[in-house]
């Protein structure tokens, strides 16, 4: 059974003080149904990724809440949680549902509402996805990725500038995406002159706290964009259990599964959306995917040139990535796949990659405890 | 593609002060792998249902934690949350995964650790699955079900004794289940003489706060017990939006879907495991499933006789139900299906229903916002 993407919608990502979780879902559902002349009853099921509404807002059983938004159509509504990969895991469950032959059209939602809470509350809530002992020892996600960055810079002789290049590129792409949270271009010196969050990561090395919702309509009826694979793999949660802090095994494993399943090699990928929760994450993911060799991503990415943004192939994070587009954690995985859909449908506006035929989205949970790789083909 | 159950294991349910969430998962995984001569690498994926570890214990991304328990096999591990139906939703995702043709054997886990927290904390955390306004107004789950019970008793002229009959029957079955939290038989007067929790519900009308884990091995290879259907449906979350407080639409919808899918009628079901978080819930579920007509379950259940426990057909809640077996919320849906498996495999010991061929498990989220119905056939 082949699965296709019919449509995609994303709310603006950002600090949306005037919108609730329900408002964000309602906007996404309404636009997708209206633009496709569908009513809720035309859907076979809804799959939703959300990480934090339980921890931050005592808000569980989102399934029934979404059913109310869908005028009590009574559909199966299935919530998944896998930290920052919740959205892509919802997509995984949705693809399996359709492949099992139980329906024609499903809606996949990713949603998060983070800015109604203090950044301390959000940082602590996000740290729920660290291992217990590391969490109790006071580690946070910026701290976890700073450890990886320290080792990376030292081992390969890179500098903070190599990290900064990632932020500069992602802000460049974000400047072309009207739905992005941050739309200003930045320079390497902007990054280097910004405040430290966790040495060697500066504030411009970190993705922001964001609100937003993203939605995909999946279907078994042929459209221009096929879902060629969606694979999930795990790694140890504890950094202390990893053989090598610089290899994201879950990323490598999920990519291997997905590439095999889709029957393509990493060299055939035209564009990537990868999980850049921190600049170091983007470099490590590129290496773990096999786009670059070990220790080479820093040099490879230094070749990105804002004046020839499409020259470096594969093109990476045209959405602006988590860094510039924003990172409403449960929404990110769906947004990444949505960006590939826009690109492969020739609907990506000023950031359109011409002639792109195969795209790969990679969504990480936590510090690499789980990864989802999805491959779309035109 | 047909799906079968290969094995089932349940930890003791109860107040397991000496066991952590990890211990409970470890015990379940170890026994199932060992008894079936499997290693973690023989599994294609793991699906886990858990409601509260995020809210109560800042413990998210259970997927990577389970991967550590599985010796870092790197498998896809997928967490679902649908309040007290989290376990059955994990089962639903697992069945779809296998039906999509991606593997041969998967493990489904349901797990919850509740007794490390005060009952106030647990009650508040559970209330996360109520609608926002009802939650803010101070409604709790005993309160929500007490509202339904009030209406039920008044509308049909029933008394608290009709509710008590359910608790008495479930404790009778629990006395025969070595894994049950409460193993003492009780009488109607025990129930009536117990303290009020929320009028008209007394303490013996309520399922307890519990720890426990349940695990199923599913396979595409033929075994004696087939998964004939697993269907999910939703209803409004808010009680105030329901047309009739006494009709659980999600239960009726999920049952209709599952019965159609399995090609059986409710009259052909030999045994049921239904969601008796409160005694009133069991009566309303029996009516919403179509086992009894509207307003008839109170009378029907009054015929249960401890001296002829197998006489009333279909036989209901031989595990002891949530009431007596215990209700570790994320585990319950898996345990219900596991009990059907034991019965259909002739492994249910003193509570064995002889000749049972078709079983139905019904797992409710919250006050009926979502329901999962699974049908197993020998």
Image (cartoon, coloured by chain):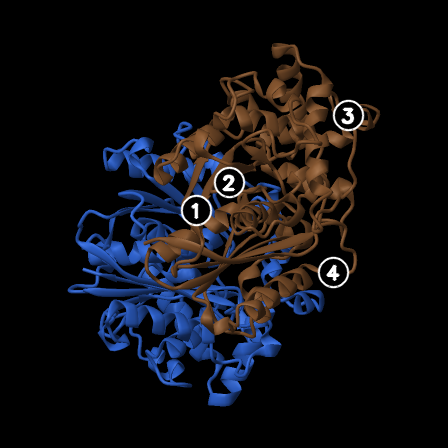
Chain colours: A blue, B brown
Q: Please report contact status of discs 1 and 4: CB closer than 8 Å, yes or no.
A: no
Answer yes or no: are tags 3 and 4 on the same subunit: yes
Whether labels 2 and 4 share one chain: no
Q: Nearer the viewer, mark 1 or mark 3?
A: 3
**Where in the figure is residue A183, as x and y percent of width and height?**
37, 55
Q: Are marks 2 and 1 in contact (CB under 8 Å)?
A: yes
Graded by Cα atoms within 10 Å as few (under 14), some (14 to 19) or many (20 or more), the crowding at tag 3 reads: some
Image quadrant in which the N terminus of chain A is located: bottom left
Secondary structure under tag 1 reads: strand
Report x, y in % for residue B201.
Answer: 73, 25
Q: Which residue is mark 4?
A: B19
Q: Say whether disc 3 or disc 4 marks the residue closer to the N-terminus.
A: 4
| Mark 1, residue position | A48
**Disc 1: CA contacts within 10 A as few (<14), some (14-19) or many (>=20):** many
The disc at residue B188 is: 3
Image position, residue A235 (x, y; %): 51, 72
């Amino acid at each position: 059974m082949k699965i296709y993407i019919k449509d995609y919608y994303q709310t603006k990502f950002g600090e949306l003080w005037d919108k609730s979780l329900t408002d964000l879902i309602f906007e996404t559902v309404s636009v997708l149904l209206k633009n496709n002349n569908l009513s809720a009853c035309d859907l076979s099921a809804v799959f939703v990724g959300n990480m934090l509404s339980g921890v931050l807002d005592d808000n569980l059983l989102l399934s029934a809440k979404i059913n109310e938004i869908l005028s009590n159509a009574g559909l199966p509504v299935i919530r998944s949680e896998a930290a920052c990969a919740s959205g892509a895991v919802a997509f995984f469950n949705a693809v399996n549902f359709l492949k099992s032959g139980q329906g024609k059209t499903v809606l996949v939602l990713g949603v998060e509402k983070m800015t109604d809470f203090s950044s301390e509350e959000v940082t602590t809530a996000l740290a729920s996805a660290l291992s217990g002992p590391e969490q109790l020892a006071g580690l946070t996600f910026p701290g976890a990725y700073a450890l990886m960055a320290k080792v990376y810079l030292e081992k390969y002789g890179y500098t903070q500038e190599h990290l900064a290049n990632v932020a500069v590129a992602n802000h460049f792409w974000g400047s072309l995406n009207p739905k992005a949270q941050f739309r200003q271009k930045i320079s390497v010196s902007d990054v280097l002159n910004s405040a430290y969050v966790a040495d060697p990561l500066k504030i411009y090395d970190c993705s922001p706290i964001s609100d937003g919702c993203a939605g995909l309509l999946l279907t078994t009826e042929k459209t221009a964009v096929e879902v060629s694979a969606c694979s999930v793999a795990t790694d140890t949660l504890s950094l202390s259990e990893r053989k090598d802090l610089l290899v994201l095994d879950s990323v490598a494993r999920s990519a291997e599964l997905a590439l095999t399943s889709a029957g393509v090699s990493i060299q055939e990928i035209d564009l990537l959306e990868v999980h850049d929760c921190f600049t170091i994450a983007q470099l490590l993911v590129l290496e773990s995917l096999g786009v670059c060799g070990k220790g080479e991503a820093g040099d490879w990415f230094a070749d990105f040139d804002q004046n020839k943004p499409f020259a470096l192939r594969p093109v990476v994070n045209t959405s602006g990535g988590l860094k510039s587009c924003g990172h409403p954690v449960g929404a990110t995985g769906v947004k990444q796949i949505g960006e590939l859909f826009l690109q492969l449908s020739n609907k990506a506006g000023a950031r359109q990659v011409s002639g792109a035929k195969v795209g790969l989205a990679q969504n990480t949970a936590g510090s690499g405890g789980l990864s989802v790789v999805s491959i779309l083909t035109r």
